[in-house]
Amino acid sequence: MTTDANNSLEQDLLFAIVKEKYGHLLTDEQLAGVRNAIVGQRDVFRPIREYRLTNGVEPFSTFTPFRGD
Amino acid sequence: MPDAFTFKPIRELAGLIAGKEVSPVELTQTFLDRLERYGPHYNSLVTLTAERAFQTARQAQAEIAAGRGRGLLHGIPWGAKDLLATGGGIPTTWGAAPFRDQQFDHDATVVVRLEAAGAPLAGKLAMIELAGGMGYIHPDASLTGPPKNPWDTGRWTGGSSSGSGAAVSAGLVPFAIGSETWGSILIPANNCGLAGLRPTYGRVSRYGAMALCWTLDKLGPLCLTADDCGIVLEALSGPDTNDPSTWPEPFAYDPTYNPGRRYRVGVPRGVLDEASDAVRENFEAALENLRDVADVDEMEFPGFPYVEVTSVILMVESASAFEDFLAEGGPLELSGTGWHGRSPYARPAVLATDYIKALRLRGVMAKQVDEVMAGYDAIAAPTAMNTATPIDEEFRSRSMTSAGAGDLMGSIGNGCGLPSTSVPSGFDGDGLPTGIQFMSRAYDENVCLAIAREYQARTEWHRRHPPEPEVRDS
């Protein structure tokens, strides 16, 4: 499959998840808006996915174990 | 007609109180009257907090009379964006119809700190619903109606700290607190002709403030001058055990800060590409003005997908913060029209790996941006590329869910948690303000404030104020 086709399948699957969770709340018009937004989000993910990071680069937020006393 | 106390910076008002030319109670009465009379005219007031304000003002008056002054804010009234929790039966609406009756049994830390400084809380101020967190494209997205700009009520204040911007600009309070996740302090400052300060992330406790995005939310002041912003930030800042993200050192405002050399100001290459003519002309004039005290050089940030990284973090954290609200259909009860193309229901459709990758990239971004910024005292840019837009129109086409042309300064500044202050840089042909922002390295608020003060010492834009509105007594 081409990248575009993969992307399209991914957006279809993501939309299916949203529709399953929230579809009962939304009209057809609103669901169409959700779908458009999900398709638009491809452009947000693309440069993030394309940027290569080495294995040791951690999320920029630190987990600290908690001890109450 | 404005009275003798309206449109006076904090330092001047404090001098009047110290000189017994006005008492904290009189000052509080003055601003409560103005808030009550003009607040609804601008759709900027949610709740007048007169009883609470007078309680603080009376205490301030007694303490000052007894020689126990608490500092420059002692007896100076202020307004709070209505996402700051207030106990005592005062509603905290988050600017949204579904939360119009919401009450808390505690005060936000910033409310506690300002009242500890002796500053009376005069009112809770309007905002874009949920700080714009569900995605909005029209100024009507506010519980109290579209927030009107005091410079022209046919224009918008900007959001989401809309009422905070309008109230200070119209002289309804001497200063106000707003919040910024991405643009919500600086844009109202720009549109309303004010000084606004977005502090470093963690400088000010977020405890008791509505959470939109835990790692992007900041609280900060909207004021008449950069000097005022420094005074207020000092009172707000400091560690808070209720907010583990707070920086351990309190901010000590230095109103005399000077690097002992010429300032070094960088201007990002291409930053004026999308600016309107008025914004461009005023920005270039501002830089020319600053060349008296600063070396101004073009610079370039390292290449990263700043807008995309910050957008993904915002999408995912806001979807989680409002998970129950989404599941209950809450967004369908909001006032804003036209959100379908920016549907909040698309936000949960982000893979965990994309969010974590954005958090990893954020660290690399923050380090490389800091390396570049170490060569400058501040990076200067227009605060917004246009003046205030019409109140009855969609205000932008850029979608949070599409990269678009992007907001370089906003995505870097908020994504990396950097401080920035905006001050007025002039007006356009319609009499609407433009702004210039100065963004500094993390925790360098004294530096960006110093440059903004230098600029304000050389210009008069901040001394202009909107006309007094004609409001009929009911």
Image (cartoon, rainbow, N blue to C red):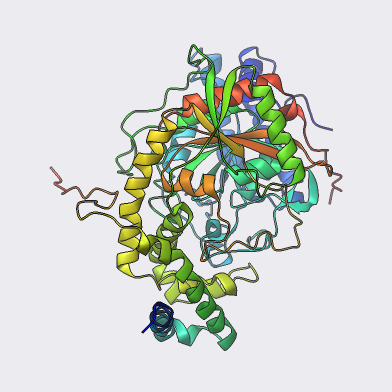
Q: Is residue B130 above or below residue B473?
A: below
Q: Position of residue A48 (x, y in %)?
A: 38, 60
Q: Is residue B262 above or below residue B75?
A: above
- Lateral position of residue A52 relative to residue B403, left or right: left
Q: Position of residue B435 (x, y in %)?
A: 67, 38
Q: Residue at x 41, y 66 (%)?
A: A45
Q: Position of residue B238 (x, y in %)?
A: 37, 32
| Quadrant of the frame with the N terminus of chain B | top right
For the question of whether residue B86 can be seen, the reply is no
For the question of whether residue B77 can be seen, the reply is yes
Residue B101: quadrant of the picture: bottom right
Residue B382: quadrant of the picture: top right
Residue B372: quadrant of the picture: top left
Q: Residue at x 65, y 43 (%)?
A: B272
Q: Nearer the viewer, residue B355 or B345?
A: B355
- Lateral position of residue B11 relative to residue B322, left or right: right
- Lateral position of residue B162 relative to residue B345, left or right: right
Q: Nearer the viewer, residue A38 or B210?
A: A38
Q: Position of residue B459 (x, y in %)?
A: 72, 23
Question: How many circles with numbers are drawn on the protein?
Answer: 0
Q: Is residue B116 above or below residue B70?
A: below
Q: Residue at x 42, y 66 (%)?
A: A46
Q: Is residue B427 above or below residue B450?
A: below
